[in-house]
Amino acid sequence: MFDNLSDRLEQAFKKIKGQGRISEINISETLKEIRRALVDADVNYKIAKSFTDNVKNKAIGQQVIKSVSPGQMMIKIVHDELVDLMGGQAVDLNLKSKPAVILLAGLQGSGKTTFAAKLARYLKNNKKRNVMLIACDVYRPAAINQLKTLGEQAGVQVFANEDEKNPVKIALDALKYAKENDINTIIVDTAGRLAIDEDMMKEIRMLYDVLKPDETLFVVDAMTGQDAVNTAKAFNDVLDYDGVVLTKLDGDTRGGAAISIKATVNKPIKFSSIGEKLDDIDVFHPDRMASRILGMGDIVSFVERAQQQVDEQKAREVEKKIKKNKFDFNDFLDQVQQIKKMGNLKNLMSMIPGMNKAIRDIDIDDDAFKQIEAIIHSMTPYEREHPESLNGSRKIRIAKGSGTTVQDVNTFLKQFEEMRKMMKKVLNADPKQLKRMEQLNKNLFS
């Protein structure tokens, strides 16, 4: 995500390295490089210019605090400006009506239908709401079937009428059905077009006027860069929507839409969508996105994802087993299943500080655990509970049963043993040392 922009900004910060303090002279080249990096990332030139002017005004004369270099201070100032530019803080959905109505708008191909299902699943699982999807795209071939399939995967109802071609009539019927069946949230998937046209705007405005939605969200493909910002402005002139959704942030995006869309339409980005899985949806946090743009990862989102999937009671039991060196293959298999539920593996790893650049050119398949799972499933219950029991003949049998080689089995066993040692070492680490490490990480942004 934003790899090129992150690299360019990193290079810019190097120009001020080693300076005793920040001054107008020694930051001029850095600011020039930052502005170029933003423009190349498809940020509007005026926004990029305003951004660097603000950074300059805040940076000049800043005293470098103890243990923080001018380069680090500059990173902090740029980070804070990026946060402000992208909205400052996360903005939640405002769902007060019964049923609450969420209207989705956007061009065809923006990922609107997939996002509708992701949002439904998010509201159902995270907010405990009774959600129904409404199929109001009556033009795109297979749009209704796609929504039905996604709705089934998300575990929510889908209201559709394939014989009705009037989306307003479908929406009103759905609203009536929701009231009669104790459904407290409906998400309306509307038709998109390949480009903005009068008929499209008229239809979405009619739905808006009739449904009086609690939330109107504009869904936009982040890969379209400045075009995304221009389209967002055109829709906002007609709908005055409540927020923006950025999809396909895992693609080859330059980042311009995420950085400049708030400044252009003055509407918050409420969600970002990464990947095709229904769990690949995140509340948009400007501070976390700024950290990712600057190559610092997003450990808070990583921990939140983990907390959503991890069973606390199981986690405590596993911790005890690790300390006693009793962590076995059954426990490992449980951990794998929880990791898989957290979403796209490469995206997850990129959230860990320092990992994004390391894994950039590595192809990480979401099926990366398949071989490991096959090996463990080929073990007997006794072998899973007693890793030390795996002798040569057992390994041969396991390799045959899992469709792997003995070398594959040995490689996995070695990695498993190293992981057990590492986890035990971390759990038994000196709390004071861990506290010092935590404080060092906080120094820059305290």
Image (spheres, rainbow, N blue to C red):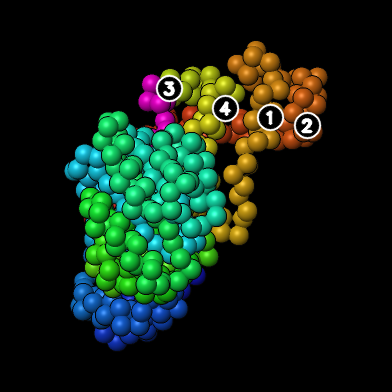
What separation in Å lies between label 3 and label 4 (alpha carbons)? 13 Å
Q: Which residue does the numbered mark 1 point to in the structure image?
A: 374
- Asked whether the viewer can see residue 87, the reply is yes
**Observer-nearest residue: 62 or 89?**
89
Instruction: Give the answer, above or below, for where 45 lies relative to 317.
Output: below
Q: Amino acid at mark 2?
A: Gly
**Observer-nearest residue: 111 or 191?**
191
Q: Earlier in the sequence, mark 3 or mark 1?
A: 3
* Image mark for residue 333: 4
Q: Residue 239: percent from the left, percent from the top?
A: 27, 64
Q: Amino acid at mark 4?
A: Leu
The quadrant where residue 221 appears: bottom left
| Pair 3/1: label in front | 1
What separation in Å lies between label 2 and label 3 (alpha carbons)? 31 Å
Q: Amino acid at mark 1?
A: Ala
Q: Is residue 403 left or right of residue 336?
A: right
Could you tell me which secondary element the residue under label 2 belongs to?
A: loop
Q: Which residues are magenta?
A: 308-315
What separation in Å lies between label 3 and label 1 (alpha carbons)? 23 Å
Instruction: Give the answer, above or below, for where 423 lies relative to 345.
Output: above
Residue in view at x 30 percent, y 78 percent = 47
* Image mark for residue 403: 2
Q: Amino acid at mark 3?
A: Lys
The reply to whether dot 3 and dot 1 touch (C-beta < 8 Å) is no
Q: Which residue does the numbered mark 3 point to in the structure image?
A: 314
The quadrant where residue 52 appears: bottom left
